[in-house]
Image (cartoon, helix red, strand yellow):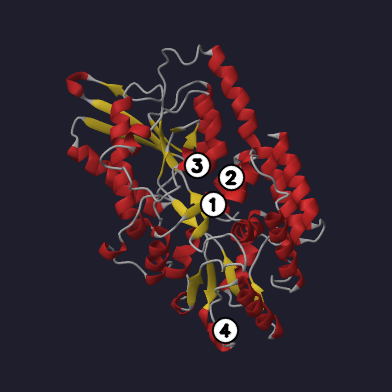
Amino acid sequence: MSNKYSVRKRSHRKWVAGLTLLLSFMLVLSGCGVGKDGQGGSSGAGGKVTLKMMHLWPEGSSAQQSKLVTQIIDQYQKDHPNVVIQQEVLENEQYKNKLKVLSASNELPDIGITWAAGFMEPYVKGGLFTPMDDLLQGSKLKDKFVPGTTDAYALDGKTYALPIELNITPIYYNKAIFQKYNLKVPATFDEFKQVVKTLVDHGVAPIALGNKDRWTGSLWYMYLADRIAGSETLKKAIDGSGSFDDPGLIQAASEIQTLVDMNAFNKGFNGLSNDEGKSEFMNDKAAMYLMATWELPNFTTNPEIPQAFKDQIGFFKFPMVAGGKGDENSWVGGPGVGLFVSENSKVKAEAKAFVEYFVEKWGEQSVTQAGVIPATKVDTSKEKLPKLYVDLLNGLNEASNITLFADVQMKPNAAQVHLNMIQALFGKAVTPQQFADQHKAAIEKGN
């Protein structure tokens, strides 16, 4: 996947299962982390506290995020002169590798970055992350998060990290192309299919898609499943309390193949990467592009993208399906990275206090300074933002549900089955019933 966020989410799956075993083994050898001097901070003479924070926003590749992190740290140290915060900054893959190594030797930094759900699980089960529920219920952060965003960081009733990013997936569209063919933004899926037909009739690719990466096609299935069967049915099918045999979920798979039969997607979509598929939209060759809000800078503030192109990009919510159980304010998406505090930190209280401060300040400044939508609510009346941001943030504030990306929700092996089946479904190599059967078997296998 082209963006860092998505790469992080998906590449970790190959080693999550192995990490669980490794962590368990190493913790047994180390006596479950008794008395080691490692990456964590310390309390010194005169009440001085040193906090060690490891993150993944190098100045060179993530300049805006790096600047914001440093600003927050500088201000915190100014407000708390007894605290020194030492940063260790790594690139994405280096970060993940080091986190794994430090975990195995029980030497995590006091504060670090994690991803949700399956990535976080082995660390939590290894007793390495401390619960953060006291912060969630505290005066500074209570009711500040967008509903559902902290759920992906909860395990067995406790929350082990606080998200600082949130992405939802609207359908971006090229207003100039729509205007040229007198098309209106579709409110229903029937209207959407009529838009597709009109564009195909005029030789325009309706939808930009690079499905070699597979998660891109998953977004389409997830939305159709949400709109037809409802978010609860989809959630239960994924967690195993329900089933992919549900008629609504099978219908969602069938609708994917209907779109394929209509030539709704650009040519060769199943063999193209997301970047290659996206280029069809960025070069005015395709009219629509379903993608997460991490693309917003490309449509608003990125100086490398021509302003004329940015001015003609709008968005709409995924259309409702007639007779479906979905809600137009239900989004497919999920929180990005979150902050954890090490269970074995010697300065845990001070680390938690800084995390609480960081989440609050990041939420206030990340959109305007880094173009990143935070997991906490944004008051758009107080910010000067591009209209696309304002409209999406207002839509997000009205969200009734966030359905987490399927391959993030599922356990590693089931996620691979899902992704493989997505490409097979789009390629018409399986029937909707076979698609459901394979999912059902993978979920029941439980890994």
Identify which residue is drawn at 54% across, 32% down: 121
Residue type at mark 1 is: Thr
Find out whether the residues at labels 3 and 2 contact each other: C-beta distance under 8 Å.
Answer: yes
Q: Is residue 124 left or right of residue 353?
A: right
Q: Is residue 411 above or below residue 230?
A: above
Amino acid type at image mark 2:
Val
Q: Which mark is residue 152?
A: 3
Q: Amino acid at mark 4?
A: Leu
Tag 3 near tag 4, CB within 8 Å: no
Disc 4, SS:
loop
**Along the viewing direction, whichever of 306 and 352 lies nearer the viewer:** 352
Label 4 neighbourhood size at 10 Å, few (<14), some (14-19), many (20+)? Answer: some
Choose the circle earlier in sequence order: 1 or 2.
1
- The secondary structure type at the circle numbered 1 is strand
Residue holding disc 4: 183
Q: Which residue is mark 1?
A: 403
N-terminal label among 1 and 3: 3
Label 2: element kind: helix
Front residue of 437/259: it is: 437
Q: CA distance from mark 1 to mark 4?
A: 29 Å
